[in-house]
Amino acid sequence: MLPKKKEHPKEKTSLHPRNKHRQRYDFPMLIQSCPELSPFIRLNEFKDASIDFANPDAVIMLNKALLKHYYNIQYWQIPSGYLCPPIPGRADYIHYLADLLAVSNKGIIPRGDQIKCLDIGVGANCIYPIIGRAENGWQFIGSDIDVKAISAAAAIVEKNNSLKEKITLRLQKNTNNIFNGILQADDYFDLTICNPPFHASLEEAQSGTLRKLSNLKHKKITKPILNFGGKSNELWCAGGEERFIQKMILESKDFATSCFWFTSLVAKSDHLKSIYATLEKVNAVEVKTIAMAQGNKVSRFVAWTFLNREQQQKWVREKWKIEAGSQRMEVRSSR
């Protein structure tokens, strides 16, 4: 028996107002930009045009089409088995980060090369630098512990003129470190970005994948095919998300004056209590939790800074150097 068809709204109002992906996928438009997507389009059980989201090749091709159409990315290839991120949710994080910076700039989003971001765990897909660069003109450094991921991300940067010399990739040689070994003496960042490994073990990651595939196929799936991919370091680590973020917070204290806002996605709300306790332990001056939602999924990111208000104002004056009138006001309705 087929599941009852869900009524899909014309606009995904849970996504950030500036998110380009609030409308349902316009497959004819995407095929125009990326004809290679066409063979993957099919009618689902409700006779709606779609792709098979349980097919890794289809998901990758959809991402290629989205990146080409909305972000002018002409080349985007990831090695087999590596994480293929859902782009709408990744874009949301970037837009909410822009709002976070705008708070210190009279509601105006600071754009351009003077805004520098560090993407911790950039992955082979390089997705946050791609979107951050296209939407706001920010510069990025992406770090990762995986040599192959760094190589793939470097190829994406090199083969897209809009990314060249705007995104730098650095290999983290010590898997026990996050900032140490990546941040150099003269580095400073307005933002650090991180989508930490969620699961605490390979078995837990595979179990989660089986649940997702079973929901997509409307039947029990026992073989863990990763439709969105993901290597071990992308999906799980000892202690999972909670321990990873705690370690990041502890290490961030050593770079207190090198970054305006440290941030990390937090997938599970149960982890917030220990995260807040760790932030209190390192004497973070200001902590913010920003709620996000993609459809039925509720997420958030935590942001913390060691700069007091006077230091924040000095940072904006000296590092952003935004000329009057060069930025347009962004107004975002609150939910």
Image (cartoon, grey):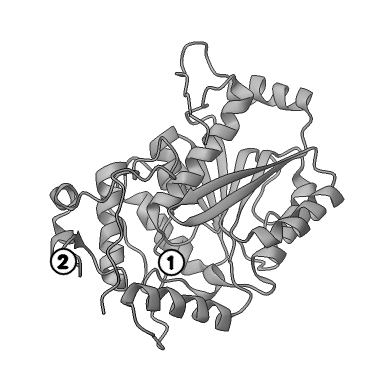
Q: How busy is the neighbourhood of tag 2: few (under 14 within 10 Å), some, or many (20 plus)?
A: few
Image quarter of residue 7 = bottom left
**Which label was assigned to residue 15?**
none
Q: Amino acid at mark 1?
A: Leu
Which residue is most to the bottom?
Answer: 222
- Closest to the camera, between mark 1 and mark 2, is 2
Q: In the figure, 328 relative to 72: above or below?
A: above
Q: Nearer the viewer, residue 201 or 76?
A: 201
The location of residue 109, given as percent across then percent down, is 51, 27
Q: Secondary structure at mark 1?
A: loop
For residue 226, say whether it is visible. no
Question: Could you say which disc has been placed on residue 42 in the image?
Answer: 2
Determine whether, in the image, residue 257 is placed left or right of residue 32. right
Q: Position of residue 141 (x, y in %)?
A: 54, 47
Of residue 268 and residue 1, the one placed in the foreground of this image is 1
Answer with left or right where residue 145 lies relative to residue 13. right
Tell me what residue is drawn at x 65 percent, y 41 percent: 187
Query: Which residue is pictured at 42% across the width and 53% down the height?
Result: 295
Badge 1 is on which residue?
83
Residue occupying image coordinates x 74% and y 59%: 246
Task: Evaluate whether residue 326 shows in this view.
Answer: yes
Please say if the residues under marks 1 and 2 sit with CB atoms less than 8 Å apart.
no
Percent x, y of residue 174: 67, 66
The image quarter containing residue 286 is top right
Left-right relation of 239 to 130: right
Q: How many marks?
A: 2
